[in-house]
Every structure is written in C-alpha cells, then in structure tokens.
Image (cartoon, rainbow, N blue to C red):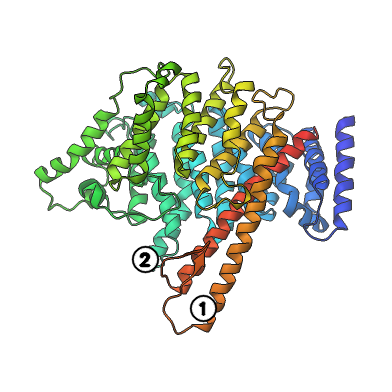
Amino acid sequence: MKTAGMALEQLSEVVQRCQALPDDSYTTEDHNIFTVAGQTCIKEGNSVQVLSIVLDEKNQEIVRCMGWNLLPPLIQVLLKKEDKNLPQCLAIFNHLLETCRPKELLIGLLEQLEQDDPDTIAESLHLLLKPLQKVLVRLGGRKASSLGMALSSVLDQVAKLPLPHTKEQEEDDVFSFCRCCTDMIDFVRPFVQEVRHNLLNNVMQKDELRTELLKFCMKSLSHPLLEVHLKEPDTLALSPLRTFATEILNILGSIGESLSSLVHQPLLKRKQVPGFLEEVVRYPKESLASLAHLVFVHHLAADTFPTVFSPVFSLRCNIEHVSELYEKSLVRVEDGSLRADLLEIKTFLTVPQNLIKVMTICPKHELRTKGLKVFQLSIDKFNTEAKYRFFQYMLKTSNHSGVEGYIIKNIKNQIDIALQPGNSNVWFEGIQLMPLLRKVLILPDGPETDLLQYLDRVMESLNLLRYLVIRDKVTENQTGIWTELYKVEDMFMKPLRVGVNMSRAHYERELQNTMEAKKSKAKESVLSVSVGGEELPSMTPESQIQALHSALHTFDMIESVLARIEELIEVKDNL
C-alpha cells in the first residue's frame, strides 16, 4: 500500500504541475512519471482516484496527450472481469477513447492485442475490436493505412487459434475461434458501408480504404476459409464459419468486386488495384481458389453468377484454381532440415536471387505471386544457422526495399521463436544476433534516405525495434538490444528523425507551392510538380495535393512509431 500511496502522490503532483504548462509542452520526465505512477495506481487498486483525475475538466489536455499510456493495466483489469475496480477502469478506458489522440490510441490498442495464449487472444480481440473501430472512425479520411495495419494484426492473432474441424468443435467453440470471426465482420462493417456509399456516389478518393478491405477478404479466403471444412446446412443449421464465408463474399460485392469476374476472368487481364505497396499481391491464387471452392462446392453467392456461362467454360476457368489447391502439398523437404553449409553451393543462393527478380520485375502477376511463395518456402526449409546466413546475404545483395522489408519481417519471426521458452538458439539472440541487427537497424543513406522509396524497409525495421524493446526485458537482455542501444540510436533512430523532419519540410514546401500554383493557374486543367528533382506524372491539382498529403501522412506514421519506441525506451530505462 505504501507503493500505491507514493504512486498516487506522484501522479497528483505531475498532473498539478502540468496544469500550469501550455498545451502539449510537457517534458519527457512528465510523460514518464505520469505513465509509471498512473499504471501503478491502477495495478494497486486506486482506480477511483485515477478516474477522478482523468475526468477533471482541468486535466483534459493532459489526458489527451498522455492518457493513452494508461491502457496496459486498464485492459488487464477489463480482461479479468471479476476485479472490484472494473466499473472505474471501464469508465477510464471509455474516457480515454473519447479524449486521447487517435494515432496514439491505435498504437496502444494494437500493442495490447498481441497475445500468445489462445484464451487470452480471443478475449483480447472480443474486448478491443470495438474500441479499435471507434478510434479508426475518429481518424476520418486518413484511416486507410491504419485500418490495414489493424486488420493485419487481427488476422495474425486469429491465425494463432486452433481451427475447429468437426461439427462438435464448431458448436462448442472452445477457443472462441468462431466468435472471433463474427467479431471481425462486425469490426469491418462500418468501413464496408463507407466504401459502398462512396462507390454509389462515385467518390474515388476513398480507393485506399477499398484496397485494405480487399486485402482483408483475400487473406480471410486464404486463412481460415481455405483450411476449414464448411458444414452444410443439413449437418449444422447455424454454422458460424459458413456465415463468415458468406459475409466475406458479401463484402467483396459491396466494395465493387464482381465474384464472377474473380472466378472466371483470366488473372493477368484483371485490372490492377492501386495501393501502398506494389509487392503485396492483390489477388492471390490460393484465395481465388478458395473463392471458387466456396461458390462451386458450397454454392455460396451462386445466385450472383450469370447463367450464360457454360459448364465447360466454368471447368476451364477452375482448372487453375484446382491446380493451386494441389500445389499446397508440393514440398517434400522437411522444414528446418537444410544445413548452412549448403549455402556454399552456388545454386542455393542464385535460385533465391532469381526468385527476387521474378518477384520484383516480372510483369506477370501470377508469376510474381508464385515467386514470393517459393521464396518463403526456401526460407522455411533452412535450419536456424542457414536462415541467419541467408538473411545476411539477402540484406547485402537484394537492393530492393520491399525484399529487404520482407527479410526483416522474417528476422523478427525467427527472434520471436528463439525467445519462446525452450526454443533458445545461438543465432537469433545474444552475441550472434547483433551483427544481423546492425545490418537492419540502419538507414541506407543516413538522414538523406528517401523514406518513401525505402518505406517497406523502414517500417519493418521500426516494427522489429519496437518488438525488441517491448519483448526483451532490460534485466534479461536476451537479444543484446539494450547493450547496443546507443549504437542503434546513433545509426538509426536519430538519423531517421532528422530524415523525417527534412522530408516533411520538403513536402510541406511542395504542397504550399502546388496550392499557390493552383490558385494562380485556376483555369488550367493540370499542373506539373517536381519532388526530389523528379517531375511527378501529370495530374489534376487536386490529385497532386492529395498525393503530397499522402506522403506527409506517411511521415506522420513513421514519426508516430518512432516516438512510441523512444517512450518505451525511456520508461524501461527508468524502471
């Protein structure tokens, strides 16, 4: 109780001190004291006093700037449910959702979404999806990339849950997998309605939102819908999985995707959908194969298909989907069985290099997709040391931001595996890991790095660093990140902050010039704008301005994650 009393006193003092400061001018020390003291008060049961402080009208600017740091202990109480302080914690939580800045709330909620235990995963999703939806709605017209990040995190969590294979497992829903599927549909519903409204009213600037929902549907078709066996109505009258599949197909129709075109049209003639990352496959073969299976085997959305297609034509189109389903059982080599010394054989390096050329240069969509799948398969077959050597080689030779980002994501996955109990290895923790991290946590051209060109690499590097700071305790330092932190700050974090500031200033100046040019040339239909010495393609002034705003939003996103990492480091240093 002494600890709780001291924490409450510290919290009251920092709040009182901050009341006298101008808006949003609080120091790092203020943030740290507020975070540590506030979290301690909630953990120790002083939520009534915290609620009083949070609701006080004089403290709303403080809550807006710092309140989101109280999310971790609040969410733990809400997950436990039986805690006597539940009503007060729920009231604090709801007030934070209304008051705090949405970008920070988004990061905080997504961090709390990441769990490993199946029971906790399902409960966290059920608790946090509605608040996440509310935060995304608050972001207004710039929520597309944030929605994509949220949906990716949610699907990653759902993928950790055991799949129900029998009728009894689906009915009992022991691990709440079916409930999670229902929650996901409820989560995306307002965004689907927004895109549908935009399409009906010919509003095109929301296409990025449509792209993120398309990704969600394609990923859902791949997992879980490709891996579960749907029960027919005569076997299970109310099947949550069948309902989920139906809803996914309905979403595709609502966002302007023709199901018959997806199934029947040759893949290479389908229109290209614009999005943030060129490397992301919009129409994965296995997802389309899953869609064809749902339509032709389970007869879902069959009423939307024209009757003019002959059975022979449908069979010819579906052969590609059938072959894709067979391809999933292609590999005979066991995962993790290829030794590092095999990399001394030239073929084991030249083949992945050729795959990278296919993934990044080949104009045929289906071949890029196949290249990416085989590339990942080759990684999976290496043992731990071979993966480590392979990642080093790829970071040195690929010279492509998307590929480097993909490799860094794989490195994060291997570190995560190594840090699991009983999985310790010498390559992805400790002394051996640091040389690899030094190749990752660095800007290719220092502060002058083109952040838009290297966006994939930069964001995956930030995600890896944030994961290490959260996952690895200072006292344990399993990865060695805390020993090398000063180098990471000098070689990566500080140059990145300088680079973000330089890039933002440059694009803000270009935005101002474009808007002034628009005013002075109001009668002209197009403008010419030069960014980084290169002239952008001819677009209307509105499109130019939108593109520049999108770039500035990207810099905000980078800065937001970077700031979060800096805060986490400060907090852990002071523990």
Residue 440, horizontal then vertical, whole percent: 57, 36
Write down the residue under mark 2.
200
Q: Position of residue 180 (x, y in %)?
A: 48, 37
Task: Classify residue 233 by image quadrant.
Answer: top left
How many discs appear? 2
Secondary structure beneath disc 1?
helix
Q: To which quarter of the image does residue 24 belong?
A: bottom right
Badge 2 crowding class, 10 Å Cα cut-off, few under 14, some 14 to 19, many 20 or more, is: few
Amino acid identity at mark 2: Leu
Does residue 448 appear in the picture of this structure?
yes
Please tell me how crowded label 1 is: few (under 14), some (14-19), or many (20+) other residues with Cα within 10 Å: many
Q: Residue at x 56, y 26 (%)?
A: 415
Mark 1 — residue?
518
Can you say which quadrant of the picture contains the N terminus?
A: top right
Decide which of 365, 4 is in the foreground and name it: 365
Q: Secondary structure at mark 2?
A: helix
Of the two numbered discs 1 and 2 in the rendering, the one whose residue sits closer to the viewer: 1
> On screen, 418 above or below 506?
above
Residue drawn at the location 57% of the way across and 23% of the way down: 428
The answer to whether 502 appears left or right of 8 in the picture is left
